[in-house]
Amino acid sequence: MSLPAPDAETLRQQLTQALTPAAREVLALAIERAAALQLPLYLVGGPVRDALLGLPIVELDLVVEGDAWLLAEALASATDGRLTQHAAFRTATVALEHQGQPLTIDVVTARRERYPAPAALPIVEPATIQEDLARRDFTINTLALRLLPDGDVVLLDPFNGREDLARRRLRVLHDASFEDDPTRILRAARFVARLELAVVPHTRRLIDAAVRQELLLRTSPPRLLNEIWLLLDEPAPERALALLHTWNALPQLGLSWSPSIFTTFPAARRSLAPQLLPQVYLALLWLAMTPAARQAFGERYNLPAWARTLARELPQLLALPLDRPLDAVALEALLRRFPVALLHALALSSPATIQANLRRYLDEIRPLPPLLSGEELRALGIAPGPTYGRILRALRQAQLSGMITTRDEALAWLERLRDDEHAGSCYDPSRHSEV
Ligand code: CTP
């Protein structure tokens, strides 16, 4: 039994509720400009899915039947937005700020796609909205709202996506879906984990077949890496990773499974800033992998600089003698050079003593501001040179061991140091730090 079709008023309300006031205004502007350009306009895929689920719309995905660049250019100039045009599929993105809020709008030309070979990029041609919906991954992503110039909305749902959404089911549109685009295996895991869906049995069989054929090994590493980043940006990536493990897909991505991420990932979320999480998740995954598997991952993917740094530093960090109590001076000397994401990841996945050392460094030592800076030494008339480093290191040691705790004490210490130097004594900051 299929769901009764929602009336236009209910749809309009769901859409309005899912949009921020700023996004609502920008969407109204898009409707007006598309009408002026005589381009049929649709809100498609993710935003419609999320609006029907009562979730906030985070990105406006617009499709026009006709030239998307015309609408994107008009929108960018009307909103003072930054326009990026991609020639390959003649798509565009407008990044703008409205009412103090950042907003991204994707504008694409309705297109049909043909895949020349499994896992290859598709050949695209302009098409109707129906054909555009038919090229998509899952039924829940084939919903579109025609946005009419008078403010009316009409739902297009050629694949019964609304019913699958209501029944929380993930289903592909056709049997070749994962062959065409194996990255959909990762997308499936992300949607199932995020929206708490169940994969229908036939789609699950298609995933199993795609994994058996090792189609992910034939997919270009940059596309896979992009999907891995999207996965690590999910609200609970460990759930998506667990699904990929169940589907036996992790080895083809160069990743290994560790049940420990069910504990460490949520613990990371509870204690760390959201922008640090993807780095910490990656480090946690790597910590659970063998050195050989880690190295293979680094060789397969063209990692960004921050990830290369994590990969390079991780073995050095693991080699440190952190399994014994260490004082603050020793901890800082050992740990200062390592990226915080790596330190957090090791803290989250280590036994008590190592964890205590790392927590102490991260929570107490690292945030402790230095008592004096190089600039202050200069302002105090000390000639720049290698002595700066020696003075600041000695001062830091004295600070960490609790012998000098305030700026005034630091200045007094420095005074004594200079008096001694004037008196001709040999310079030895460590001696002074011990007073
Ligand atoms: N799409 C697809 N196959 C892919 C990637 C995307 O069919 N490999 C389609 C889907 O219909 C999707 C749309 O393109 O809805 C836009 O892609 P994207 O922005 O990645 O997906 P969203 O559905 O918006 O998901 P998210 O909520 O993660 O942004």
Image (cartoon, rainbow, N blue to C red):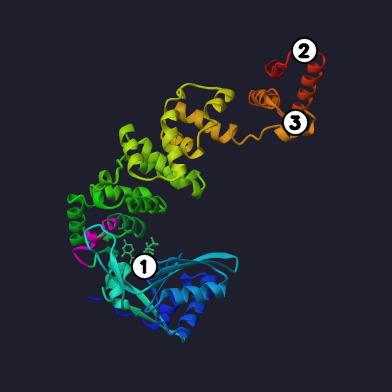
Task: Examine the rendered structure and indicate whether residue 345 appears above or below residue 409.
Answer: below
How crowded is the residue under tag 3: few (<14 C-alpha within 10 Å), some, or many (20+)?
some
- Label 2: state its secondary structure: loop
**Which residue type does callout 1 highlight?**
Phe
> What amino acid is labelled 2 in the image?
Ser
Q: Position of residue 287 (x, y in %)?
A: 38, 35
User: At x 75% / y 34%, what residue is drawn?
Assistant: 376
- Which comes before the other along the chain, label 2 or label 3? 3
Magenta-span inclusion, residue 177: yes
In this picture, which residue range is highlighted in magenta? 174-184
> Local crowd at mark 2 within 10 Å, few (<14), some, or many (≥20)?
few
- Residue bearing the label numbered 1: 89
Evaluate whether residue 167 shows in this view. Answer: no
- CA separation in Å, label 1 and label 2: 74 Å
* Vertical placement of residue 127 versus 199, above or below: below
The residue pinned by badge 2 equals 425
Residue 262, image x, y percentages: 36, 43
Q: Residue furthest top?
A: 425
Task: Give whichever of 212, 298 is nearer the camera.
Answer: 298
Query: Between disc 1 and disc 2, whose residue precedes?
Result: 1
Above or below: residue 362 compared with residue 160: above
Q: In the figure, is residue 285 to the left or right of 408?
A: left
User: N-terminal of the two: label 3 or label 1?
Assistant: 1
Q: Quadrant of the C terminus?
A: top right
Alpha carbon distance from label 3 to label 1: 58 Å
What residue sits 34% from the left and 36% below the top? 295
| Secondary structure type for disc 1 | loop
Q: Which mark is residue 377?
A: 3
| Disc ID at residue 321 | none
- Camera-near label (3 vs 1) is 1
Quarter of the image with the N terminus in it:
bottom left
* Corner quadrant of residue 134: bottom left
